[in-house]
Amino acid sequence: MMRGIRRINTVIATERTRYTKNKGGGVHYFKSTVNVATDADISSTLTYYASSGDTNKSTIPNFHDTKTTYASKTTPELLRSYLVFQACKHPFLVSNARQLLHISNHILGKGMTQWIMKQSFFAHFCAGESSADIQPTIETLRKHGVGGILDYAAEADTAADHKLNSNQPARVYDYKCEVECDRHLDVFRSCIHAVRDVTPDGFAAVKLTALGNPLLLERLSTAIVEMKRMFANLDCNGDGVVDWDEFDRGYRLYFNDADEMVPEYINRLDPSNTGAIDYISWSRYITFRDLPKLAASCRDIGPLALAAPSKEEIELLDNMTRRVEAVAEEAANCGVRLLIDAEQSYMQPGIDNLTVNLQQKYNCRETQERPIIFNTYQCYLKDMPERMMTDLKRSEQLAYHFAAKLVRGAYMHGERARAKEMGYPSPIHDTIEDTHKCYDESVEYILRHRLEHNSKSEVLLGSHNQPSIEKAIRLMNELDMTAGSDQAIVHFAQLLGMSDHLTFGLGKQGYRAYKYVPYGKVDEVVPYLLRRAEENSTLLGNSNKEKEMIGREIKRRIFG
């Protein structure tokens, strides 16, 4: 991971010197400082200096303006929000929420319990039960300069093994059968249609574990990891490419059909006869479906051979791919942008693989003016910078628009617990400060890469972290990506019912601000609501601030 951060820093340091500009006869000085390589200054910011004659730069919104923040809410709604945040402060209520709901169902009845939930937590965190119900919320958001990211929020009602510390929805689907996955496909299609009909400039969010067995994604991910390890073993000198001689020698070392297969693989992996194979070509032309044949020719039964899928697994993957393709096709036909949510690290390589294939088709520069498919990168993962940079390079090589949603991460406690239980190093950064640094540096890397390559890449910042948002705005100013301009390709998003001061402040200032808008039947979204309560209980700094701002606004309305 540190190698990835160092590579990011090297590029950023080089590119910063390019963007000192002289426009309109006036001298504009830009200076940016981000201390990424040290732990001394976590809160360092990008510092913007400009001549006093520059009037085209976007200002940072006033995130303390309660009148703007809560202009869309009635006083009774504010009182409800205050009580919801107050409830989230009590660990007993949050940690025992499922048991309390069970008791309430037993004493008051399911109908009354759902009515109470619908009038409280559901009304605060969700927009309605159907695509028709959400229209008033979407219209209210639109009037205040905020778009919608529609998210069908039904979850499997399974107890959470670990609390979440996230800034993105963490959907959990319970795999039952292929028929259930087909039903989820219909749900996602309906969600896409709702975006098209009620918030045309919005997004639809999709979680791929709804469209196939999560264990299949884990198997696919294991295979991808082993194939990447195989490439590293063939790359004898560690220069990042495998020349033909390295491939021939390495293949003969591990497999017993070299005379037959080496020429065939070289033709496939290096069709332009460059004499070298890079990892992007390797990962593109050696697929999950090739593993059974490779495994059959292995000299020894090792991790690669054990990762080979069965015939049934390949059929299930084909079914899952069909569903994923159908969702993407529907989104493209409706002109709706699709956010592919991130999941646990042990499934993420498989999700990335499916998403990259979608991007090659639906973000193709020849056929699309803007990206349709956005992949999600969780910045609390140590390997995230390297994966992101590889994907950016891949988008350049294969001529498609790169598009990313950056979040900090949603599965920290579960990831660490699993790593400890299974005896491997935690994939999560050791400190929250390291995660903050990775997030801010990744934003800067993507934006500078866009300018360097004159691409149409876009990024959505899913963050409730005010310092990160302010840094991004200062960087946008430095790189002439101001709000309202054609170069304003940065989107900002927060969850409905959380961080309204950020969303509505950004919307008022003309930034591309969005709310994640969950919807679904009350009984189906109860697990989602419990997760929102858990997040607010673990993010007391943010919820306390919001509760304090709501209190100030209520007092302002009552007492003037």
Image (cartoon, helix red, strand yellow):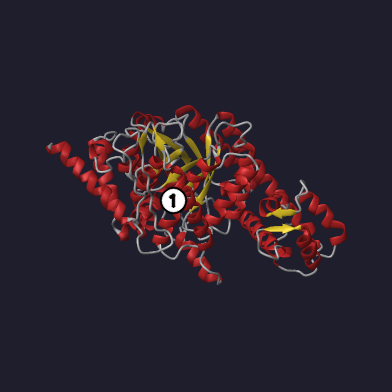
User: How many numbered marks have been drawn onto this rendered protein structure?
Assistant: 1
Given the current orientation, which residue lies at the most extreme left position? Answer: 559
406 relative to 25, above or below = below
Q: Secondary structure at mark 1?
A: helix
The image quarter containing residue 24 is top left
Q: Is residue 464 visible?
A: yes
In the foreground, 108 or 229: 229
Quadrant location of the C terminus? Answer: top left
The residue located at (78%, 66%) in the rendering is 254
Given the current orientation, which residue lies at the most extreme right position? Answer: 259
Left or right? Give the position of 504 relative to 246.
left
Left or right? Give the position of 337 relative to 534.
right
Instruction: Give residue 125's position: percent from left, percent from top.
Output: 37, 43
283 relative to 473, above or below = below
Q: Is residue 518 visible?
A: no
Instruction: Give residue 107's position: percent from left, percent from top.
Output: 34, 52
Q: Label 1 sits on what residue type?
A: Pro
538 relative to 205, above or below = below
Instruction: Give residue 60's position: percent from left, percent from top.
Output: 31, 41
Left or right? Give the position of 526 relative to 225.
left
The image quarter containing residue 398 is top right
Disc 1 target residue: 527
Given the current orientation, which residue lies at the most extreme front position? Answer: 25
Left or right? Give the position of 346 relative to 498.
right
Instruction: Give residue 141's position: percent from left, percent from top.
Output: 36, 33
Task: Assess disc 1: are there few (<14), some (14-19) or many (≥20) residues with their C-alpha within 10 Å of its C-alpha.
Answer: many
The residue located at (60%, 45%) in the rendering is 355
418 relative to 512, above or below = below
